[in-house]
Amino acid sequence: MLRLLFLYTIGKLIAWPIRRRFRRFDALAENPQAVQEALLLQTLQYHAGTQFGRDHHFNSIRTVTDFRKHVPIAPYEYYSPYIERVKRGETSALLADPKVLMFALTSGTTASRKFIPVTERYLADYRRGWNMWGQRAMRAHRRDVSLKPIVQLVGDPDEFRTEADIPCGSISGFTAQIQKRLIRFLYCVPPCTGRIKDATARAYVALRFSLPRDVGMFLCANPSTLVQLARSLDQQKLALIKDLAAGTLHADLDIPPAIRAELQPRLRKHRELARRLDAHVQSIGRLYPKDVWQGEKTLIGAWTGGSVGPYLRQLPTYYGNTYLRDIGLIASEGRFTIPVQNDTPAGVLDISTHYYEFIPEDEIDSKQPTVLGAHELIEGRHYYILPTTPHGLYRYDIRDVVKVTGFYGRTPLLQFLGKGNYFSNLTGEKISEHHVTRAMEASVRTCGFGPGTYALAPIWDDRQPYYGLFVERDDSISDAKSFLIEFERQLQAHNSEYAGKRESQRLGPVRLEVLQPGFWQQWDRDRLERSGGVPEQYKHPCLIGDMKFRTTAPVEHEVAVTKIK
C-alpha cells in the first residue's frame, strides 16, 4: 500500500511538467524550418573557435547556403583526424566543450567501430529524447505500464580507454550508471550487468533480477536481444528457479569476481515465486516471459524498422500479447526520431536536437545531388539523412535511408528503411536491403510462413546470374517452392529494375540455399568480432552484396523453381 501511495504521489508531481514538455514539443513541430535554422547557427557559433570551426570558416557562415558552401557532406573518415586528437585530450580540435565524458562506440554493423564524443550537451540531448519517448509511451498506457519496473539491457560503458584516459563503450550503459536513485529503482537489471562479457551469463543475471519484479516494459535496441533473452529463460529455467528459491547466483556462471561481489547484496530469496514457476514448468514443460508475467500486458520498446522483421514475428510466441513501440531512429551518433504511436516504425524528426539535411535516394551518387531541409520533404519519398550534431559531426553521411510516412504538425515522420551500404547490383537491378525486407514481409503475410534468420546474396553464373535466399536447415520453409514463387513475385513488385532484368532473362529466379544449422549465429558472431561491435546493437544483414558469399557458406543443398517468370 505504501509503495502504491508513493508511486501515485510521484505520478502527480511529474504530471504537470510532462504536459508542459508535450506542449512545447508540439509547438516546435509546427515550424521546423525556423527551429532548424536557429539551431544550426547556434551550433556553428558555439564551435567556431575549434580547429574544425576555423578550418571550415564557421565565423563567416550566416545562412544555410553558406554552411553548404564551406562544409562538405562527409563520412566518419573525414572527422577521424580531429576525433583522434580529441581522444588524446585535445578537445578543442573539434569541440568547444571543456570535457569529453566518454566516447560512444558504434555497433560495428557495417564497418569498424567509430568513436563519437559524448559531452554534457550530448548527454542532456540523449536523456531528453529518451524521456520524451518514455513519457509518451507510459502516458499512453498508464494502467499497464506507467511507473512499473523496466527490463533494459545495456552494454559496457568502459570497454577500454583512450590515451587521455577517456572511457569508450556503450552510451546506454553509461546513462544507466549515472541514473538518479529514484529513477534507478524502476530498472530491474543492475547496470554492472553490462560489463559481463559472456552473453549467457549476462542474460542469466538480467533474468535473475527481473523475474521477481512486476515488469511493465522490456526495452532494448534490437528485438533479436529479446528473442534470445526469452530462449535463455526457457533453457536456464531450472537453474533460475533453484537460484530464486535459494537467493543465490550459481557459481558456474562466467561472471568476474568484482561484478559478482557487486551483485551479491541485491540477491533475495523468492521461494513462493520459485514454487509457482516450478509448478508451471512441471505442467507445461516450458518457461517463456508470457508465462511469468501472466495476465499482464507489457510494452516492448525496440527497433521495428529495417531488417528486424524476422525477430518481431517471434515476439508474440515468447512475450504474448504486448504493446509494441519503436524506440526511434537512434544510434551512437544521436537520436534522430521520436515515435509517438505504437505499431509503427515511424517517428517525429527530433528537430530541436540536431540539424538535418536530406538527399533523395536516387541522387546519392550524384556529384551535385539535391539537398533538402526537413521542411522540404515529400510524403512517400525516400531520402538519405545527413545530421549535423552539437558534438562535432557536420553534414554527416551516416548512410541511413529513411521514408517520409506523413507529418506531425509540419515536421516529417520518418521510418528507417536500412543502411545504404547494403546494396547489390549484378546487372543493373540495384537491389537494396529495403527491397528485400519488404518482399520478405509481404511473402510471409501471403504464405503464412517463412524463414527466421535469412539473407539474400548475389551468385554469379556465366550462363545466368541469380540471387540465393540463404536459410538454415532447421529454419527451412515448409513449402519451399511455393514460398520461392511468392518471394520472387514480391521482389519484382518492389523493384521494377529487378523485374526488368528478370523479364530480359539477364537474371535467373531466386533459389533457396539451405545452410547447416547454427551457421548464422556463428557468422554474426565472427562479423562482430572483426568489427569490435556489440550484440545489443548489431543488425543481421538481410542483403549481402558479396558475390563470393556462396563459395564460403556451407550450403547443403539448393532448391530451384525453373518455371518462375
Image (cartoon, helix red, strand yellow):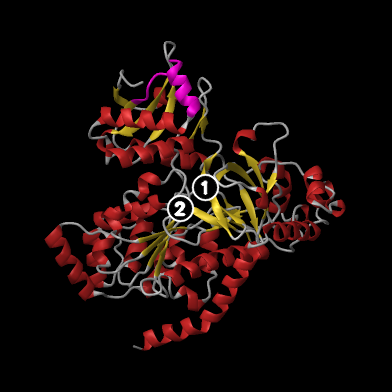
Placement of 412 over or under 506, stated as above or below: below
Distance between the alpha carbons at the discs numbered 1 and 2: 9 Å
Query: Label 2 amino acid?
Result: Trp
Placement of 167 over or under 8, stated as above or below: above
507 drawn magenta:
yes
Which badge, 1 or 2, is on the more N-terminal residue?
A: 2
Q: Which residue is mark 2?
A: 303
Q: Residues within 10 Å of mark 1 (few under 14, many from 20)?
A: many
Are dots 1 and 2 in contact, CB under 8 Å? yes
Residue 133: percent from left, percent from top: 51, 64
Residue farthest to the right?
60
Say if residue 546 shows up in the picture.
no
261 drawn magenta:
no
Circle 2 sits in a helix, a strand or a loop, which is it? loop
Q: Which residue is mark 1?
A: 416
Can you tell which of label 1 and label 2 is closer to the viewer?
1
Where the N terminus falls, by quadrant? bottom left
Which residue occupies 14% across, 59% down? 284
Circle 1 sits in a helix, a strand or a loop, which is it? strand
Residue farthest to the left?
283
Part of the protein shown in magenta: 496-511
Placement of 499 over or under 464, stated as above or below: below
Viewer-proximal residue among 385 and 175: 385
Residue 406: percent from left, percent from top: 54, 52
Where the C terminus falls, by quadrant? top left
Name which quarter of the figure residue 463 lies in: top left
Q: Residues within 10 Å of mark 2 (few under 14, many from 20)?
A: many
**Side of 520 relative to 17 (left or right):** left
Residue 128: percent from left, percent from top: 59, 67
Query: Label 1 amino acid?
Result: Phe
Placement of 242 over or under 483, stated as above or below: below
